[in-house]
Amino acid sequence: MPEEIILNGEEKMIKAVEALKKELSLIRTGRANPNVLNAVRVNYYGVPTPINQIASLSVPEAQLLVIKPYDKSILNDIMKEIQLADLNLVPQSDGTVIRISFPALTEERRKEFVKDAKTCTEKGKIAVRNIRRTMIDQLKKLEKDGEISEDELRTYMDDVQELTDKYIENMDALGKEKEQNIMEI
């Protein structure tokens, strides 16, 4: 039973790290990154569809993103949705492809994005700590009910703390990496 609690908690911590990766990928750096369009959905035959499923995305240059729709009839819909997504990107079309030029970020804008990255990282770490607290509460309940001894409780709590430290370090590394990418010119 305690092992089950720890395994469940670890699964949740892994999901928290994945959620942080996804959230950090949406923060712009000075380079063109197709991931900034992950949240954009285009109505394709009545179904909201991610852009990467209806078009090929490529980065031919560091500051340029090219979107080539598989179906040319949805080119204007893609452009419209990118503009409505409020990503501060200006798509330009030549009738067959959409080009999005990523302007170089100002120092002030970079610092804003670093703050956003730190906020996302902190939220992720809070989620992991909440998972730890839930696991510890469940283990204490087992000890109170007499299913495990006090010594076993301490051992399991040490295991929970090790897991927590591991995933928080992982999140810190992800956050620092994103900050470096943002501040890189």
Image (tube, grey):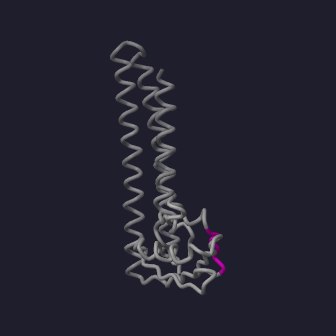
Residue pictured at 46% horizontal, 82% vertical: 105
Residue pictured at 37% horizontal, 81% vertical: 108
x, y percentage for residue 6?
48, 31
Main SS, magenta region, reads strand
Q: Nearer the viewer, residue 66 or 159?
A: 66
For residue 56, side relative to residue 183 (left or right): right
Residue 107: quarter of image: bottom left
x, y percentage for residue 98?
58, 80
Residue 69: quarter of image: bottom right
Q: Nearer the viewer, residue 98 or 185?
A: 98
Q: Nearer the viewer, residue 97 or 138?
A: 97
x, y percentage for residue 155?
46, 26
Q: Which residues are magenta?
A: 55-60
Residue pictured at 59% horizontal, 65% vertical: 52
Q: Is residue 116 depicted above or below 164 in this figure?
A: below
For residue 63, side relative to residue 163 (left or right): right
Q: Is residue 66 magenta?
A: no
